[in-house]
Amino acid sequence: MLNVLIPTDFSDNANKAMRYAVELFGEDAKYVLVNGYEVPYSGASMLISIADILEKDSIQLLNEAKNALIAEMPKLKDNISIMAVAGAPSEALKKLTSKGEFDLVVMGTKGASGLKEVLIGSVASNVLSDVHCPVLAIPADAEMKVPSKILFAADDQILIEGKLPAALGELSNRFDAEVLILNVVPMGELRHVGNAEGQKHASKSSFEGVKHSIHFVESEKVNEGIEAFIKTTQVEMLA
């Protein structure tokens, strides 16, 4: 059974990520709601008092979030637990995932409307670079649905080797989703590559274990090429 870690600061974005996770995996997963609370520097005796207060508040809010999820999905009563951890959220997640007990982190991204905003300048970016398991970052305006198409932005080496990240393959097979493998090339170079070449690599590769198709798009900036492709296709998830 999948073990899913869901960090929350109790914001609307975090609440949406929680619901996305439980709707996506349902009873096939165990969920741990975690809140990292930071204790301010102060005198020793006052520090203990403040830490106790912050921990109690964190546990109370976590229980409220847990109970709200169970009210919506009663069958998950035994699948959801909580954890209040002292420290910065990104450091807490790094420590928790380093033990190898979690298969996935699902978290919201604040005010992120584009690819660059999701990946840069947010708690999500720190988590993506530091944690020891895959991360699903859920933008605030993302539609909640089981993915039927997953876009995987791949470089030339990926196409040559024909290997998908193991977690991506497992996720796509779990939902019987098609992986759209996208390679962004510089302007004017599309004539030198083509789907036939990509399919040639794929037929001899581990891509065979996953429902997939291979695509190319021209752009001088990779993130802009990816976003342009997303606008022309109905994908529900980006890897």
Image (cartoon, helix red, strand yellow):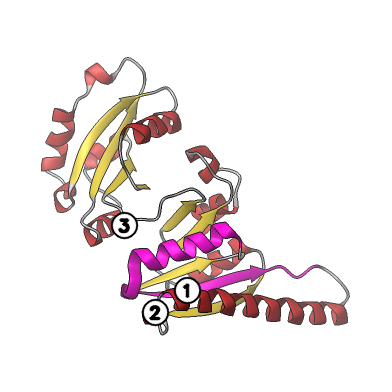
Contact? badges 3 and 1 (CB < 8 Å): no
Write down the quadrant of residue 161 in the picture: top left
Q: Would residue 117 be found to the left or right of residue 168 on screen?
A: right
The residue located at (49%, 80%) in the rendering is 81
Residue 103 placement, left or right of 63:
left
Residue on which disc 1 sits? 69
Say if mark 2 contacts mark 1, CB within 8 Å.
yes
Report the magenta residues as a range.
11-40
In depth, the one of 94 and 148 nearer the eye is 148
Give the mark nearest the N terminus, 2 or 1. 1
In the picture, residue 185 is in which quadrant? Answer: top left
As drawn, is 27 to the left or to the right of 173? right
Q: Give the class, few, some or many, for how many residues have Cα within 10 Å of label 2's Cα (few <14, many ≥20).
A: some
Among the two numbered marks 2 and 3 on one chain, the one whose residue lies closer to the N terminus: 2
**Secondary structure beneath disc 3?**
loop
Locate residue 55, reporting x and y percent. Answer: 69, 79
**Residue highlighted by disc 3:** 146
Q: Earlier in the sequence, mark 3 or mark 1?
A: 1
Residue farthest to the front, as pictured: 72
Quadrant location of residue 169?
bottom left
Type of residue at label 2? Leu
The residue at the point 44 percent across, 57 percent down is 135
Give the class, few, some or many, for how many residues have Cα within 10 Å of label 3's Cα (few <14, many ≥20).
some
Helix, strand or loop for disc 2: helix
Is residue 205 among the parts visible in the rendering?
yes
How far, Cα to Cα, is label 2 from label 3?
18 Å
